[in-house]
Amino acid sequence: MKKEKGSMTTQSYPLIQKAKILGEMVYSPMAFAKMLGISRYELIEKEAKGTLPPAKRDSHHQRYYKPGDIVKYRNYLGLLSPIPSIRKQLFLNFKGGTGKSTVSASYGFRLAQMGVRTLLIDLDPQGHLTQCLGLNNQQFTKTLFNALIEKEEIGKVIVKTDLPTLDIIPSNLNLSPVELSLFSMNSREFRLRRVLSSVEKNYELIVMDASPSIGLLNLNAILASNDLIIPVLADFLSYHGLKILFETLSTIEEDFSFVFENIFIFLNRYNESHRICKRSKKALETHYEKYLLNTVIRQDTKIAEATSQGTPIFLFAQSSKGAVDIQSLIDEILGLKGVNHVG
Ligand SMILES: Nc1ncnc2c1ncn2[C@@H]1O[C@H](COP(=O)(O)OP(=O)(O)O)[C@@H](O)[C@H]1O
Ligand SMILES: [Mg+2]
């Protein structure tokens, strides 16, 4: 293990790597229309009228669309971008196992599928976000460590995927010395904010997945974000974790005069038939009403299976409860319902 640390700087990769996460993905007219926020009927009608180019056809003469088509079609239709100005969103909870990595991976992946230029950043040396996208995190020699500590140009740390709108900064154990290294640096709390400022013009959305810890990297991530997204489980420990998180946030507010533009809390792995779930929901509604989203992500074995196979739920089981709930989470957080209609 120790020997490998040194190899971080000796191996080199091309400027921008491309990672395969999807293979040959195609969309049906129904799936494609859904991502555009129009009906299948509208899509087909506009093709017939010539407002849109004719769809590609497979050997059975069935229509299909490719991931790269979505931005073109959005432009043809004059559709508003789902995100009017760049948003930097952080999934954080000091408690582990609440769904930060799983949900943030599918959240960012889905928005990229919907045509939003997205950068996903894995802030956890365990590399779970990277793995949730099916990427073998050990293959990457560069992580955020190189950009934050070694001052390497951030472009060299970003990996493109074969979904044209999705880039990722992967992570693995090479990121773990970051806490110690940041400690002795100047303006150590604002390094991520600075580093991101040079690439954020390339994106509409930056989604970060934090590790469950209170440390300098997470402080950097907080100070670099607009929105905080907190998944919680319906149990007592999660509830306690929230208290610690909000206490930490008020210290940060005092020390750095920093406040999030938005804070969103949502229940994950929810099971209505469990009394404890209902009780926790009530408690959250009472004490965190201001931040609690209506969307609840239900317990769904498909989510766990998708995670274990390193596949975003939208590729693994598109009509599962999990996929439906994460889509509602997206719509609620970004206020998308009704936004995407032809103007
Ligand atoms: N809604 C859900 N239903 C079922 N399993 C889930 C759900 N959300 C997350 N999981 C599972 O819970 C485990 C922990 O999730 P993870 O995203 O790694 O949490 P965190 O990043 O907060 O530590 C994973 O195995 C994941 O598949
Ligand atoms: Mg995680």
Image: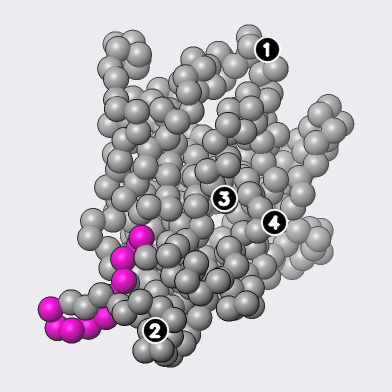
- Within the magenta stretch, is there residue 204? no
The image shows residue 157 at horizontal and vertical percentages of: 42, 29
Drawn side of residue 137 relative to residue 342, left or right:
left
Main structural element of the magenta stretch: helix, strand or loop? loop
Residue contact at pointers 4 and 2, CB within 8 angstroms = no
* Up/down of 325 relative to 254, above or below: below
- Which numbered disc, 1 or 3, marks the residue closer to the eye? 3
The magenta span reads 59-68
CA–CA distance in space, label 4 to label 1: 31 Å
CA–CA distance in space, label 1 to label 3: 28 Å
In primary-sequence order, the first of circles 2 and 1 is 2
Q: Secondary structure at mark 3?
A: strand
Q: Which residue in the structure is indicated by mark 2?
A: 50
Tell me the amino acid under the disc marked 1.
Asn
* Up/down of 127 relative to 46, above or below: above
* Up/down of 106 relative to 125, above or below: below
- Which numbered disc, 4 or 2, marks the residue closer to the eye? 2
Quarter-of-image position of residue 330: bottom right
Q: Residue visible at 39% across and 84% down? A: 50
Q: Secondary structure at mark 2?
A: loop
User: Which one is nearer the viewer's eye here, 146 or 229?
Assistant: 146
User: Which disc number belongs to residue 291?
Assistant: none
Drawn side of residue 292 relative to residue 46, left or right:
right
Q: Which residue in the structure is indicated by mark 1?
A: 186
User: Which disc number belongs to residue 205?
Assistant: 3
Q: Residue visible at 43% across and 65% down? A: 72
Q: Is residue 52 visible?
A: yes
